[in-house]
Image (cartoon, grey):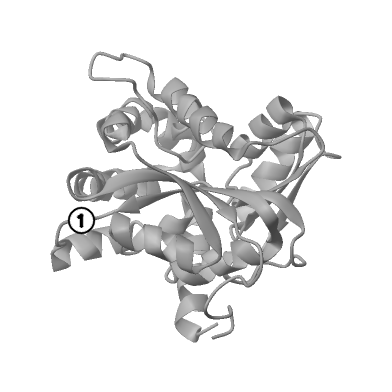
Amino acid sequence: MSAGEVSAADEVAEIYDQTFWGVELVGGSFHVGYWWDEHDRTPFLEAINRNTEIVTGRLDLRPGQHLLDVGCGCGVPAIRVAHRADVRVTGITNSRAHRDEAIRRVHQAGLRGQVRIDLGDAAALPYPDASFDAVLSFESLVHADDRERWLLEMARVLRPGGHLVLTDLVVDVPLSDEDRRALRDFTLTLPHSGTAMIDMVRRTGFRLEEFADITDRIRPTYPAYVQRMKDQRQALVDAYGCENIDHFLTGTPRILEVVQARTGYVIIVARRREGDLAERSPDT
């Protein structure tokens, strides 16, 4: 791994640690919501839970199987999957604050023997080859400087025939320098086009099964998030102090505006191929 990759991973972890209070804005799950259409008035937090069910429902899990959740955050999806599918889940995050909160939530849910939370790097997963039946990457690739390396690692630890379910931002329009800076300020790396993502998934050892563009279903997330920040400001200030909260509130609407206007959101379902994983190894 290059020094740049290490620096980028450390930067993401540091920002998530510093803005840990943001977990209270999203009910513990740092994901977009899902609305059926423009007439759907589902509340923000419930829409987030709905998207979690829609994404994780594609994992095709059976009781007793073992799921790896790459970029598990505070563990909410891992807990929901463990309850619903009766599987073991290992989550991995590079944020110490998120890891500690995830462990607390796992214990509170009575799942300490079923859900494990590790601290580590998605670009160098600390697990043996073919050790998981399924892999979930739920809005974690958005932080990857090298998506291909992450996908190679996911393929390596996934058993042949096992499912990968991931979500990612995609972009099919040119981004200005200002757009790029805004994404980077939010720890988001430059998205690929949908076609490039499909090619990358196939190149890294997977057989594509589904490519679902759900951009229109998740767009209400961005204004809903800004409104919730405004509604919850005083409570957050009382708990965490004014300076950090107001700095975040000032910059976030602009970043979300770029994401909403310039990017799309996709769910990709793929199956790990038999035989050789990819054209290059993770160490290349």
Query: Within 10 angstroms of label 1, few (less than 14), some, or many (20 or more) residues?
Result: few
* Residue type for callout 1: Asp
Q: Which residue is mark 1?
A: 172
In the image: residue 194, left or right of residue 270: left
Residue at point 57%, 47% (across, down): 73
Q: Secondary structure at mark 1?
A: loop
Residue at point 72%, 27% (across, down): 83
Q: Quadrant of residue 199?
A: bottom left
Closer to us: 125 or 160: 160
Examine the rendered structure and indicate whether residue 135 appears above or below residue 231. Answer: below
**Residue 201: percent from left, percent from top:** 46, 61
Q: In this orientation, does residue 146 appear?
A: yes
From the image, which quarter does the C terminus lie in?
Answer: bottom right
Residue at the outermost front position: 275
Closer to us: 267 or 202: 202
Closer to us: 58 or 175: 58
In the image: residue 70, left or right of residue 49: right
Residue at the outermost right position: 113
Examine the rendered structure and indicate whether residue 180 appears above or below residue 171. Answer: below
**Residue 107: percent from left, percent from top:** 79, 35
**Residue 134: percent from left, percent from top:** 66, 48
Residue at point 59%, 57% (across, down): 95
From the image, which quarter does the N terminus lie in?
Answer: bottom right
Q: In this orientation, does residue 10 appear?
A: no
In the image: residue 132, left or right of residue 217: right
Total residue callouts: 1
**Residue 66: percent from left, percent from top:** 76, 46
In the image: residue 77, left or right of residue 14: right
Residue at point 37%, 44% (across, down): 266
